[in-house]
Image (cartoon, grey):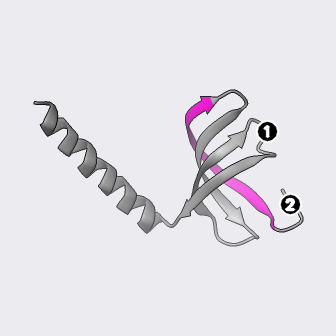
Amino acid sequence: MATKDFTYEITEEIGVISTSGAWALELNKVSWNKKAPTFDLRKWTDDHEKMGKGVTMSETELRALRDLIDEYLSEGDEEDV
């Protein structure tokens, strides 16, 4: 896919986190401007023609985010007891 300012290609659709109307929050691997794919979290329309603002991450950053989320959620479990 191409626009006036950049190109992108979704190289791997990992999963949908949530949907709202015609938009879905998705985690994908995306190649921006023909560079190596990165992990990408953003809202897309069903046809992937329109996108919202998002966050791109390396695998190292994605793993760090996973660890932070796991730690946060495990602390929350302890508070519920």
| Left or right: where 41 falls relative to 6 | left
Which residue is painted at 78% across and 46% down in the image? Answer: 50
Name the N-terminal-most of marks 2 and 1: 2
The x and y percentages for residue 23 are 69, 35
The residue labelled by disc 1 is 47
Q: CA distance from mark 2 to mark 1?
A: 14 Å
Range of residues picked out in magenta: 6-19
> Which of 64/4 is in front?
4
**Label 2 amino acid?**
Ala
Residue 25 rendering spot, x and y as whole percentages:
60, 40
Residue 70 is marked as none
Please, which residue is most extreme toward the right here?
4
How far across and down, in percent of the image, does residue 38 sit? 59, 64
- Quadrant holding the C terminus: top left
When asked about the image quadrant of residue 53, the answer is bottom right
Q: Within 10 angstroms of label 2, few (less than 14), some, or many (20 or more) residues?
A: few
Residue, x 56% and y 40% (percent of image)?
Answer: 15
User: Which residue type carries mark 1?
Assistant: Asp
Q: Quadrant of the N terminus?
A: bottom right
Quick one: 59 or 41, which is closer to the camera? 41
Left or right, 53 with respect to 57, comes to right
Does the magenta-highlighted stretch encompass residue 11?
yes
Q: Taking 71 as reference, is 3 above or below it?
A: below
Residue 75 pos. (x, y %)? 18, 45
Residue 30 vertical position relative to residue 47 in the rendered view, above or below? below
Q: Which residue is mark 2?
A: 2
